[in-house]
Amino acid sequence: MRLLSRRALTERELRTKLGAAGYAYPEIRDTVAECRRRGFVNDEQFAADYAEILASRGLGGRRIRLALRQRGIPQPLQEQPLESAAESEAQRAREALEYKLRLLARETDPRKKREKAFRFLLSRGFSCDNCRAAIDEIDFNNNN
């Protein structure tokens, strides 16, 4: 209970932490099942909440998928949160680009500025199509 009182955990994370604490497999299995039954551990809800948090931080679908996978969310439970995040991905890419352009204000070469902005969007996990669409809306020759 102490583990779950600190922050939400996925089933895999709870199993890992209990195993590291020295509990036997049957105890871990029973504890995770009881936590799931009581609603203390819910991977589906965790995936939805975590994907929403990451999307609000300006991350794209690829980075959200990676983060969910790293936290132990099974593939079928990743789909719905990713679909919800995909609806606003183009807007999030534009917002992330606006932020990056403020940081690139000193860059004088439009080609370098464009390349850096594109790499930034890709590193944030946005799809190539959304990166291109956001980049194409900006006139890099006007020193934006």
Image (cartoon, grey):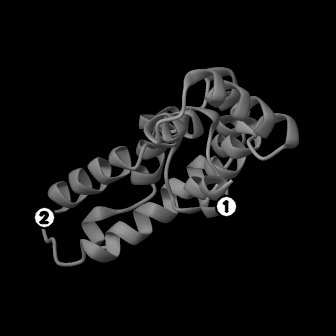
For disc 1, the marked residue is 5
Q: Position of residue 126 (x, y in %)?
A: 46, 43
Quarter of the rendering containing residue 81: top right
45 vs 112, left or right, is right
Q: Secondary structure under badge 1?
A: helix
Q: Does residue 91 lie above or below 27 as drawn?
A: below
For disc 2, the marked residue is 109
Quarter of the rendering containing residue 18: top right
Of residues 22 and 2, the one nearer the viewer is: 22
Q: Position of residue 140 (x, y in %)?
A: 29, 63
Quarter of the image with the C terminus in it: bottom left
> Tag 2: residue type?
Asp
Taking the spot 17% from the left edge, 78% from the top edge, the residue there is 106
Q: Does residue 29 lie above or below 37 as drawn?
A: above
Tell me if I can see residue 51 in this picture.
yes
Taking the spot 41% from the left edge, 50% from the top edge, the residue there is 136
> Along the polypeptide, which appears first: circle 1 or circle 2?
1
130 vs 76, left or right, is left
> Tag 1: residue type?
Ser
Q: Does residue 7 lie above or below 27 as drawn?
A: below
Q: Does residue 79 lie above or below 87 as drawn?
A: above
Q: Residue 55, which numbered label? A: none
Q: Secondary structure under badge 2?
A: loop
Tell me if I can see residue 65 in this picture.
no
Of residues 77 and 104, the one nearer the viewer is: 77
Q: Position of residue 83 (x, y in %)?
A: 69, 35
Badge 1 vs badge 2, beta-carbon distance below 8 Å:
no
Of residues 142 and 53, the one nearer the viewer is: 53
Count of numbered tags: 2
